[in-house]
Amino acid sequence: MNGNLRVGNLFGIPFYVNGSWFLVLLLVTWQYGSGLAAAFPSLGGALPWVLGLGSALMLFASVLAHELGHSFAARQQGIGVNSITLFLFGGLAALEKESETPKGAFQVAIAGPLVSFALFGLFSLAGVVLPLSGPMAGIVGLLAYINLALGAFNLIPGLPLDGGNVLKSLVWKITGQPHKGLVFASRVGQLLGWTAIAVGGASVLGLSAVGSVWTLLIGLFLLQNANRTAQFGEVQGRLTGLTAADAVVQDSPIIEAKASLREFAENALLAAPSAWRKFLVADETGLLVGTVLVDALKQVPRDQWDTTTVAAIMASAGDILTVGAEQPLMEVIKTLETRQINALAVIDNDGSLAGLLEKRSIQALLQLPQAA
């Protein structure tokens, strides 16, 4: 997964760490260890850094719990979780799909911060109830503060933060259009990103006492991801109301099963773009019954093309994914991405084959000028 290292499963969810995580683990361990060594001189040897490593791991365990909050909320809605990944700026729960309602989207978004606030309460309570002192009291207090900061920071209302997803769900609820919520929350995220870049840049240049290089890096992270989600939201808006039938390739590569190989070669192949290497095969009623490769013609002598039908050399259609003509195009795109395929067959309401849908035919739709 793009430089990510799989370290196991959590409640059936694949768990990964990005290479950047190890760098942050080292930096946080050094920072916490140095702080403990300065605050508690009696700690000897490597003990401050061992405790610093433990604190850093607990920090990332808190981030992991935050992402599990999102994951469990999604699972309650029947949404699968592909993975959880820890990286430079936190964590990410990769969901199979988005919630179908703004209420569901709100529940998934708010679940992570609620887990962080719950951990803040537990660590705070532990610091009061348990007889802790010295370094352990400091570590527990630090973990309480970190979870409070994690929950509060993520509620900033701009994508890709959880607060941005909360904002997206609210705009979705008001407008009834999920893409409008996505674009609005992304624009806020872009504004926040540019603000953080400006503040962090001014700090690095010595023009401001507010911010740091981390503020600059966080701003770049926010801006990059907000730009991506804004573009996706605009695509959603362009495709809203369109169905699979709207993206069927013109002159789709379809041949009748009863056609002779001569007809296949002289009519279908000569009329079709040279790029087609596989044709969908339909019976006399228009039902999809198989596929045939152009190269399969080479296996039959030319003097037998007039007496051999396409049905004789076709393969099963079992490997061809199909969707209904009325299926929303956004759902079709998700299917293509999830299955990692470039094309599928579109079936009309009467069961007949409507044609082939490819990723590039969807891209062609997006390039068409919008109606005024």
Image (cartoon, rainbow, N blue to C red):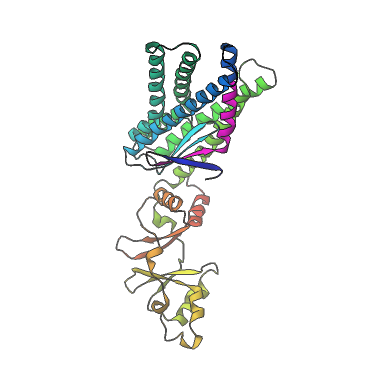
197 lies left or right of 296: right
46 lies left or right of 245: right
Residue 22 lies in the magenta stretch: yes
284 lies left or right of 5: left
Magenta span: predominant SS is: helix
Residue at the left extreme of this rendering? 350
Q: Say which residue appears at 56% left-offset and 19% top-offset.
A: 48
Q: Position of residue 222 (x, y in %)?
A: 54, 31
Residue at the front extreme of this rendering? 45
Q: Position of residue 105 (x, y in %)?
A: 37, 34
State which region is magenta: 11-31
Is any atom of residue 174 visible in this view?
Answer: no
Q: Say which residue appears at 38% left-offset and 18% top-offset.
A: 121
Most foreground residue, 184 or 345: 345
Question: Is residue 168 shown above or below 208?
Answer: below
Residue 180 lies in the magenta stretch: no
